[in-house]
């Protein structure tokens, strides 16, 4: 997962400060996820690490929904990018499902409902797969909605 994050940062690093910061946050989230391990024992042993992961998770998904996605949509509308807006309309519902799952995991841990370490480990691993899917969908949005407009903007300025 970390390698694909680094590839995304290399492709889009420097393009837009908001996206750069968000990709750095993604990288930090992945490192936190990887540091926790995926066994019930590992999760039970590192409650503070799990809390840190949850904080990073909520910050990351919130920035996506309330900052990055809105910026990408504004760009698409500014460039009358119907194809990009249609893609966003297709992808956003899936991103919303993944966000709800992530927030439900955070809420469970926030309430201290982590006594069943086996169940938490299963949810944690499932969440890892969903985050991987989310990152791929987000990369697609950045590629289509942001990079296409960057090229159009450069052509207009030339």
Image (cartoon, rainbow, N blue to C red):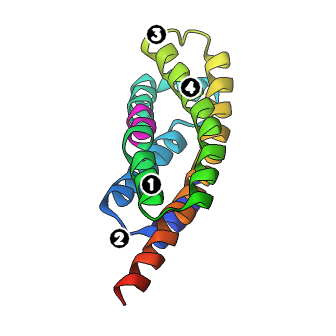
What residue is shown at x 34% (from left), y 64% (from top)? Answer: 16
Q: Write down the residue under mark 2.
A: 14
Q: Position of residue 74 (x, y in %)?
A: 41, 53
Give the label, 1 or 3, closer to the camera: 1
Q: Which residue is mark 1?
A: 72
Residue 141: tell me if it is visible. Answer: yes
Nearer to the camera, 79 or 143 = 79
Residue 129 on the magenta span:
no
Residue corresponding to mark 3: 112
Q: Nearer the viewer, mark 2 or mark 1?
A: 1
Q: Earlier in the sequence, mark 4 or mark 1?
A: 1
Instruction: Assign a secondary structure to mark 4.
Output: helix
Instruction: State the image coordinates of residue 64 (x, y, percent, origin top left).
Output: 44, 43
N-terminal-most mark, 2 or 1: 2
- Determine whether 95 is above or below 44 in the image: below
The image shows a total of numbered marks equal to: 4
SS assignment at label 3: loop
Q: CA–CA distance between discs 4 and 2?
A: 30 Å
Marks 4 and 2 close (CB-CB < 8 Å): no
- Mark 4 and 1 residues: CB-CB less than 8 Å, in contact? no
Q: Which residue is mark 4?
A: 100
- Report the magenta residues as a range: 58-63
Residue in the image at 60% along x and 24% along y: 41
| Residue 3 visible in the current orientation | no
């Amino acid at each position: 997962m970390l390698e694909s994050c680094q590839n995304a940062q290399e492709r889009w690093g420097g393009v837009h400060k908001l996206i750069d910061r968000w990709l750095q946050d993604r990288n930090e989230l992945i490192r936190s996820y990887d540091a926790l391990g995926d066994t019930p024992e590992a999760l039970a042993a590192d409650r503070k690490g799990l809390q840190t992961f949850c904080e990073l998770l909520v910050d990351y998904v919130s920035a996506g929904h309330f900052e990055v996605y809105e910026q990408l949509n504004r760009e698409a509308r500014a460039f009358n990018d119907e194809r990009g807006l249609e893609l966003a309309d297709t992808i956003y519902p899936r991103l919303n499902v993944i966000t709800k799952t992530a927030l439900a995991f955070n809420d469970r841990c926030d309430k201290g409902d982590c006594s069943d370490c086996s169940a938490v480990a299963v949810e944690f691993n499932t969440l890892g797969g969903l985050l991987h899917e989310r990152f791929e969908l987000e990369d697609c949005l950045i590629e289509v909605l942001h990079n296409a407009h960057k090229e159009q903007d450069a052509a207009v300025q030339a």
